[in-house]
Image (cartoon, rainbow, N blue to C red):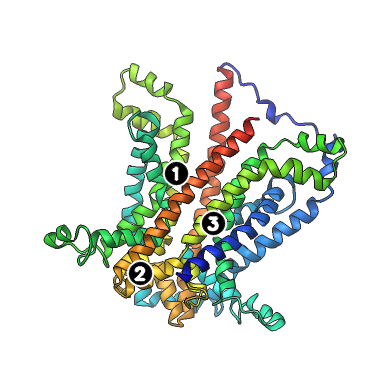
Amino acid sequence: MAFIIPPLVDVQPPKWVKPSFGSKVKSATPGLIVVVACLYVAVVILLPAVSVVVQAFAKGIGPFLENFESEDLRSSLRLTLITACIAVPANTVFGLAAATAIARKKFKGKALLLSVIDLPFSISPIVVGLMLVLLYSPNHGLMAGLVNSLGWKIIFSTPGIVLATIIVTFPFMAREVIPLLEEEGWEQEEAAKTLGASDWQVFWKVTLPSVRWAALYGLILTTARALGEFGAVSVVSGNIASQTQTLPLFVEDAYKQYNTELAFGAAMVLGGVGVISLLLKMVVERLLEQDKKARSLETESE
Amino acid sequence: MATYKVSFGLAFLASIVNGVFGLVIAWALIRCRFPGQKVLDALIDLPFALPTAVAGLALTAVYSREGWLGGPLYNLFGIDVAFTSVGVAIAMVFISLPFVVRTVEPALRALEKEQEEDAWCLGASHGQTFWRVVLPQLAPAILAGVAQGYSRAVGEYGSVVMISSNVPFKDLITPTLIVQKLEEYDINGATVIGTVMLLFSLVSLLAINLIQVWGQRYQGN
């Protein structure tokens, strides 16, 4: 660590050096490619997104803010926030635990656990909701006896919504952290242990700091999805206005009942959260990359 | 049963469109330098970040007869987009586009430009270079991305349910049918369809893994 040698990748020819014919070969078409790419993205993605903003503020800021006096909108916003407040911390803890277990321990059924974690990614959210109904429904669920004898209400109430959200958002944290932990190897943790650190200390002072940006990234993805989940929640919630309606469900309901302004107002809130999470994600991505670069420098100079 | 045809057929259509344009966008992002590139890059992730209900609302607003794109399309060509199967396909295109782009990008970055130059030096035309040298190497990544997008498009509910009129045989998709069965308390019917969907996602998960293994072997050569 005496001095740091810059990596070769950063050494680039000065600007006045003209690239040789190699780059000319490809320069025949890029213009067209760029135009097509931009046009496609503009029509398919940008235009719909902009239309939400325009529609939400079509009558100015005053009417937009008036939307929030709607009791249904407020209660759905509250429910969405409550759900996220339970689902996100739960998945952060379990996601980190699962990631550490998968990356650090050897046990039977590890591959199985890994694919089970991935399952919510590939299953339709509707099917996730359906599975919960089949399990906990008080009339025909597999656990109907248990649910009824304890007097719980899961389907068509908040616990069901929270459960559905947890299932759908589970993979994000583990997926982001596992590759980094595997790449790291565990020399540092072993070193800490031989120096007399307890398991707990190793986790807080060595493991967690080394994956902090990946964990943050996972946290952002989890939160964004938890706030916006629609399919799974719509199946288990029953969609009762002011009671079991989350914000995304409210958007659909309001639009169906021709409450266009309310729908766009609520959509604007959700969309805003989406865009903010996107921006945060970009910042964290950059931090993650810097972190990686710094680490590869360290290993090179050792 | 007709919903399977609608769901799988339209998702297939959407995946093919995305396969082509996803490659073009990935190419623009990796190989070209132009102003606004960062913005384009960020926009690709928007369908990931935007809640599906918002996406559905936005697409319906744009493609309905009073919308910015739907209006002109209806007036000029007499095509209705929102509340028809075309709209469903567009919603599927919207949500599955990032999968293709983000899967093709790393493969394209790993592709060595020298190979294309070699081919060019050996007298191959642009077309030949693309079809014989570039495309075979990118094929596994494109396929994997398209498969991921496809399985997402088949399972998508939130955005599709808003832009579709949910008329059976026309634009009623399978996930919506499950919800409808549940609303009619037809738990058995819903379970049967749900099982088919579950099997499909397991098969597609397997297929995606196989494609990725195949792609790695290809890169080893």
Residue picked out by circle 1: A216
Q: Residue furthest front?
A: B1
Residue drawn at x 41%, y 61% is A229
Measure the C-alpha gap from mark 3 to mark 2: 32 Å
Disc 2 is placed on an element classified as helix
Mark earlier in primary sequence (2, 1)? 2
Residue drawn at x 66%, y 63% is A42
In-front residue for pair A73/A134: A134
Residue picked out by circle 3: B150
Measure the C-alpha gap from mark 2 to mark 1: 27 Å
Residue B49 seen by the camera: no
Residue drawn at x 46%, y 78% is A255
Mark drawn on residue A147:
none
Please state the chain letter of the residue tagged with numbered disc 3 in the rendered image: B
Q: Quadrant of residue A104?
A: top left
Q: Quadrant of the C terminus of chain A?
A: top right
Image location (x, y in percent) of residue A7: 65, 26
Q: Quadrant of residue B139?
A: top right
Image location (x, y in percent) of residue B138: 66, 43
**In the rendered image, the vertical position of residue A195 relative to residue A72, given as above or below:** above
**Within 10 Å of the Cα at label 1, are there few (<14), some (14-19), or many (20+) other Cα atoms?**
many
**Within 10 Å of the Cα at label 2, are there few (<14), some (14-19), or many (20+) other Cα atoms?**
many
Mark drawn on residue A76:
2
Left or right: A180 with respect to B85? Answer: left
Residue drawn at x 43%, y 77% is A254
Left or right: B175 with respect to A25? Answer: left
Please state the chain letter of the residue tagged with numbered disc 1 in the rendered image: A
**Labelled pair 3, 1 in contact (Cβ < 8 Å):** no
Kind of residue sitting beneath label 2: Ser
Please state the chain letter of the residue tagged with numbered disc 2 in the rendered image: A
